[in-house]
Image: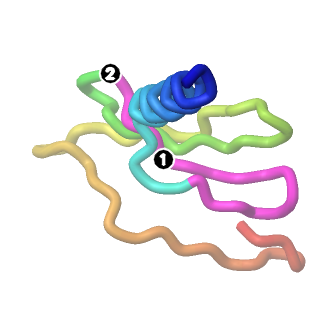
Amino acid sequence: MRGFSFGLSLLISSFYALAKTDIVQGPFKLDANDSVYINKEDDANYPLALYFETNGNSIKVESYEVDGSEPHVETVFFTKINNKKM
């Protein structure tokens, strides 16, 4: 019974942790350590932001502003520059 309770608590806590993230698209792996993702922000004027994550550290690269309506992401494309995925 104790094992069942422990397993249930892990399951519930993982659902809670996943529900707290506001990732709109991604994360998309660029290589073994790097990825990018688009996150929903609390800023009413800039509700979406692009983040670059490397070795567990996230850096905001760009914010997308409201221009008549809230921005939304339909597709994400990547290309290689100097044989590195961008």
Residue closest to the eye, 9 or 2? 2
Q: Secondary structure at mark 1?
A: strand
At which x and y percent is residue 75? 40, 71
Residue underneath mark 1? 38
Q: Give the quarter of the figure containing the C terminus.
A: bottom right
At which x and y percent is residue 36? 63, 51
Residue underneath mark 2? 43
What is the three-letter code of the residue carrying label 1?
Ile
Residues drawn in magenta: 27-42
What is the three-letter code of the residue carrying label 2?
Asp
Main secondary structure found in the magenta portion: strand
Task: Say which residue appears at 76% left-offset and 78% top-offset.
Answer: 80
Choose top left, top right, bottom left or bottom right for residue 31: bottom right
At which x and y percent is residue 70? 19, 43
Instruction: Indicate which disc residue 5 carries.
Output: none
Vertical side of 34 occupied by 15: above or below: above
Mark 2 and mark 1 lie on one chain; the one further toward the N terminus is: 1
Task: Say which residue appears at 85% left-offset and 51% top-offset.
Answer: 33
Number of other residues with Cα within 10 Å of mark 2, as a class: few under 14, some 14 to 19, many 20 or more: few
**In the displayed structure, does residue 36 sit left or right of residue 14?**
right
Residue closest to the eye, 69 or 26? 26
Residue extending farthest front? 1
At which x and y percent is residue 12? 45, 29
Q: Magenta span has 40?
A: yes
Residue closest to the eye, 44 or 17? 17
